[in-house]
Image (cartoon, rainbow, N blue to C red):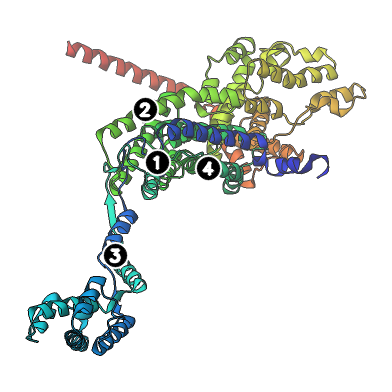
Amino acid sequence: MGKKGIAGFFAEKFPFFRASGVIVLVAFALSILFMRWVINDRMTGFLPDEPSPRSYFALYPMNFVDEDGTSVLRSRVGETVAGVLVRDGSAVELLISKIESMAKGDTSSLSISQGLSDLLKALPEEARQKILRESALLANEFLKNSGTETALTGVTSEAVWKEIEKLSLPMEENNIIFQILDEVLQPLTRVDEELTRSLRDDLAESLKPLERSVSPGDLLVEKGQMVTPQVARILKLQGYSQVTFPWKQILFALFALPFWPLWIRLQSGFRPSSPDRTPWIYISFVVGLSWVVEYFSSLFNVQGMGSLFLAGCAYLTLPSLLAFQVVLGGSILGAIVVTGLSALHVVLVALMGLISAIAGFGLLSDVNSRSHFWRQLFQLGLLQGAVSLLIRWAFELGIYPQLLMYLVIGTAAWSTVVIAVLPLLENSFDVLSPLRLMEMSHPSNPLLKKLQIEAPGTYHHALMLGTLAESVADKLGMNSNLLKAGAYFHDIGKLKRPQFFVENQMGNANIHDELKPSLSALIIIAHIREGLELAEEYHLPQKIREFIKEHHGTTCLSYFYRKAKSMGLEIPRDQFCYPGPRPRSRETGLLMLVDSVEAAVRAEMRASTSIPDLQKTIEGVVETKMSEGQLDDVDFTLKDLALIKQTLLTAFQSMYHTRKVKEIQEKDKEQLLQKLKKQEEESIEGSLASR
């Protein structure tokens, strides 16, 4: 790679990697992201787990799982399970032990209250033993008959009294027995925490998640309410901004945007390094401007205005295939940059870009005036609006009168902005639109008026060349406006010394007859350099200057060279040749052929203008240019050259036709006079009759 290094290598092989264009694109993206963060996110954005700064309403219909509601409902279902009770084996063993102690008359292991223990001790031994035995018998009976309900809730007081009354003991003893059994007979169950937790979890999981839906206009969160994580996710899906610095979008801009130009190049075969191509920095600037337009339009909930602006600029200044890729790719990238990675907004804006790319190909390809351009742009905007409304209707995104007003006003306003901005872009980036070319080719152009007054022969030659080149360009599908403008200005260098060129000598003596051949050649060749100086002075576009510089290529003035040789002068042939370069585009190559053919036909016009002679002259000129290598850098095919020759032949036939009139004989004259006299008499009689 030598001294050029990696950057120079890629700049030469892949011009899209030039830092200037990429930097412009990234700068626009970062500026929009920062502006959106400052104006939108920080002022009206939300933060999770913080009070809402304002009330948020749904913009689009959506279904979602209400995780917060599901969690609350599941917790309530779990709370219905108080606890899972299981039979307590240790409680049963303890009860059996107490029954055995009572049967033996031992109260020490009963764990009864102190008052009851003192009461038993105060009783006579026989009465105490009797009460304890009866209590043991009843407790054992309750233990044997304990079912699920008794195990869970314990023996009821009613059941205990019912059994005590069957003993037919005194009331005092019955009361003591009841107190003993009340303290001894405890529930034989316990709450199993693990089983309780498992049952609660099973019940909660068996409950299906709550699914909710929102429609446009529904309240999502009220001002002052806490923004839960779930609400935060819904707000993001709806396109609302979170008060966070847009790091994700910045990383996207830094890593993805530099590769977009490569995709454009692969899709369209666009090579801006060739001299007849639009510079990449212009594309980057226009795409960036479209993002700005899209951002300001989105503030009014109107999507697609950025792609409308981009289509208007691209289709008028770029080749159609390249313009299609620029509009489509630029709109998709703009959707990601401008909308804050909101899925619904990205899809909507990207669809608007697709409509602009497809419809713009037909609506903006043949524009003939600025008013016509505005009407076509407005129609494209209305088409975008109709598709936008259709999408909103299909997805129930909401359609309201204010939106319709914004769509119409926005379309008219941005169409007007394109009309106003386009001349500034053309002058700033030296690009050409059909409108600018038509304005340049108008006879009121100062340089053309100067040419018409000071070099009328050259002006007439330029007009004829423009007509010929335009007709051939239409046949080849080339830019006829560019060919016409290039033809009009290709010989402006002759304004410096118009009398030294034969078309301006008006039949007078040829000045070159009195000059040395080398001086004549120097004067004639100088009209290229002097034309470029005039082009610089009048600020002609670079593409027009290429016609001035390349229309003679590196051809030589053979007449003056032979004249010098016949005079015995030893002068290098290079002094009689144009400096070039040779034509490097189809347009300049075509102008060279048309210019040379027109000059050759005009020179031989007096000799003959028959079709075979014209055809021979045209084919001879084309063959000469090809043999000299003047068209080596132009991708003309054999079919193109055949079409060029045929179109020129047809055009020259109509220009240099002759009218063949049959000679009138004496006899024919007498018959003709008699016929005219008769017609005159009939006319007089008819006039008198009408009176």
Q: Nearer the viewer, mark 2 or mark 3?
A: 3
Q: Nearer the viewer, mark 1 or mark 2?
A: 1
N-terminal label among 1 and 2: 1
Confirm whether residue 587 shows in the render.
Answer: yes
In the image: residue 478, left or right of residue 293: right
N-terminal label among 1 and 4: 1
N-terminal label among 4 and 3: 3
Q: Which residue is mark 2?
A: 412
Q: Which residue is mark 3?
A: 78
Confirm whether residue 277 shows in the render.
Answer: no
N-terminal label among 2 and 4: 4
Whole-number angstrom distance, CA of label 1 to CA of label 4: 24 Å
Q: Amino acid at mark 2?
A: Ala
Q: Which mark is residue 50?
A: 1
Q: Is residue 69 above or below residue 418?
A: below
Q: Is residue 310 above or below residue 348?
A: above
Determine which quarter of the picture holds residue 361: top left
Q: Which residue is mark 4?
A: 249
Q: Are marks 1 and 2 in contact (CB under 8 Å)?
A: no
Whole-number angstrom distance, CA of label 4 to CA of label 3: 44 Å
